[in-house]
Amino acid sequence: MAETALITGASSGIGEQFARQLADRGYDLILVARRKERLEQLAEQVPTTAHGIECDLASEAAKLPGKVKKLGVAVDLLVNNAGFGTRGHFAETDAERDAEMIRLNCEAVVTLTHAFLPAMIERRRGGVITVASTAGLQPLPYETTYAASKAFAISFMEALSMELRGTGVRALVVNPGPVKTEWQAVAGYDEKTRIMPGMITAEQCVRDALHAYDRGRRSVITGRLFPWIMRATVSPKRVKLRVTERIYRPRT
């Protein structure tokens, strides 16, 4: 019997690639996102059984486990991928938008992991993959709340991976650098700033993530250039903050 992967934010970008590559590995899929039409199209294109669930996880994460239960299938792999970012001077960003981002990037991850992890531990197999970001590895001025939300995801998943030792269940946090998806447009980057150094495709990002998951890694920075960039950034935090402030400062 095929295992089943539940993927949030599956309608585009990294989530869509997780769906396609896991289906190629033989996983049945539960695809979760707000855009129903895209989920239906993707479900028709993958070679395994795929269920689409329309759900806004920023406000309805607690309702998703009940919807999954009605399908009568067990979740063997949870991929917490849904998320978005904002950028700009914190004092000028929309407060409700930032709060929505925290609910999606942090609260939904905890809610869904709570919902599906205990059964995996009982079966002594399964896994949780959460997509964080290299943004969470240091404070980022002008992406202040986004970076903090991803720092939460990193800390949560790395701690969880240690708790899961010996259970047969794996936990991996994926830290992409720039990935060419719809994320940049949603975050407010203009056309001139959407192509960033070290940018990779969503396909490569997921390929690197699944390779790390196969190897039992706890954390991975995807791509070829960005892992070296992060390793080379060994300067004191006060220096890194000055550098990142200049890099991420919105153009006027």
Image (cartoon, rainbow, N blue to C red):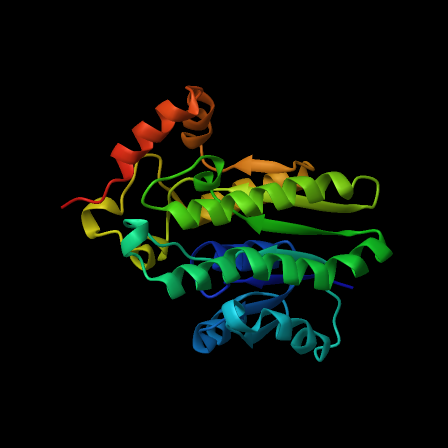
Q: Residue at x 47, y 77 (%)?
A: 36
Q: Quadrant of residue 68?
A: bottom right
Q: Quadrant of residue 120?
A: bottom right
Compare residues 189 and 79 and report the one nearer the observer: 189
Q: Residue at x 24, y 40 (%)?
A: 249
Q: Is residue 108 above or below residue 135?
A: below
Residue 61 image offset from top left, x and y in percent = 59, 69
Q: Residue furthest front?
A: 91
Residue 77 image offset from top left, x and y in percent = 68, 56
Horizontal side, residue 212 vs residue 34: left or right: right
Q: Is residue 148 above or below residue 36?
A: above
Q: Is residue 189 above or below residue 222?
A: below
Residue 224 image offset from top left, x and y in percent = 44, 31
Compare residues 79 and 40 and report the one nearer the observer: 79
Number of numbered discs present?
Answer: 0
**Quadrant position of the N terminus in the picture:** bottom right
Q: Residue furthest bottom?
A: 70
Q: Residue at x 65, y 62 (%)?
A: 112
From where the camera sits, is residue 189 visible? yes
Compare residues 161 and 3 and report the one nearer the observer: 161
From where the camera sits, is residue 27 visible? no
Residue 94 image offset from top left, x and y in percent = 33, 62
Horizontal side, residue 199 vs residue 34: left or right: left
Horizontal side, residue 233 vs residue 175: left or right: left
